[in-house]
Image (cartoon, grey):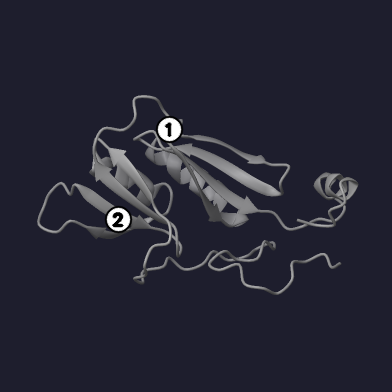
Amino acid sequence: MTDTFPAFSLGPVPQPVPGAPAPELFRGIYGMPMFVTVPSADVAASSDFWVRGLGFFELFAVPGVSPSPMVHLRRWAFQDVLLVAGEPAAQAPAQTVSFSCVLDQVDEIAAACEQVLAGSTTGPRTTPWNTVDLEVVTPEGTRVVMTAARPWDPDSAEAAALREIGIDRP
C-alpha cells in the first residue's frame, strides 16, 4: 500500500494532494447526468450568491425575459444547478446538496459567501471520513456542502480507525 492514491481518474475531481489545482470551470455542453433544481423567490439574487459566493457561472438564462424565470449555473463538469422562479420550501434548509472542491478553495469560498451574505457559512470542519466540509445556506434556503478530500495520511486517527475494522484505506 502506498501513501498516495493510485493513478486513476476521478473524473472532474482532482487527486486529493496538497496544492491540487481546481479544474477549469466547464463551459461545454453535455447531457447532464445529475443536477439540482432550486426554487427561488428572487432568481437574480440567488444567482448572484451562487456566482459570487460559491464560484458558479451562468451557463444559460431564458433569453428576452427579465428577470429570467430560470438560470442554469455550473461550476466544474457535472456540477449543475437550475435556479427556477418559485417559492422555496417554508422550512430551511429546503434541500442539501454537496459539491466537490479542493482544499485550497474552502477558505476562499467561505470568505466570498460571507461577503455576499453574512452568516451564511458554518465551518469549515474536518470530518472523520477524510474531508474538510464547509456548510453554506443560500438565500433561498438550500444547504450546500462544499467538500474537499484531504490527502491520505496513514498515521492519522482516521487511518487507525479504518485499520481496526479491517480497511487499509478508503
Q: Report the number of discs.
A: 2
Q: Residue at x 58, y 49 (%)?
A: 147
Q: Is residue 28 left or right of residue 8?
A: left
Which amino acid does the dot numbered 1 rest on?
A: Ala
Quadrant of the frame with the N terminus: bottom right
Q: Secondary structure at mark 2?
A: strand
Q: Residue at x 71, y 49 (%)?
A: 130
Percent x, y for residue 28? Answer: 36, 72
Q: Nearer the viewer, residue 90 or 2?
A: 90
Q: Is residue 122 above or below residue 51?
A: above
Q: Residues within 10 Å of mark 2 (few under 14, many from 20)?
A: many
Q: Nearer the viewer, residue 93 or 148?
A: 93
As drawn, the residue found furthest toward the left would be 64
Percent x, y for residue 121? Answer: 50, 36
Whether pointer 2 and pointer 1 mark residues with C-beta atoms closer than 8 Å, the reply is: no
Q: Secondary structure at mark 1?
A: loop
Q: Is residue 108 above or below residue 115?
A: below
Percent x, y for residue 135? Answer: 53, 39
Which amino acid does the dot numbered 2 rest on?
A: His
Quadrant of the frame with the C terminus: bottom right
Q: Nearer the viewer, residue 131 or 31?
A: 31
The CA span between labels 2 and 1 is 25 Å
Q: Is residue 58 above or below residue 118?
A: below
Q: Is residue 119 left or right of residue 168?
A: left
- Find residue 112 and report its image quarter: top left
Q: Is residue 149 left or right of residue 33?
A: right
- The residue under label 2 is 72
- The residue under label 1 is 118
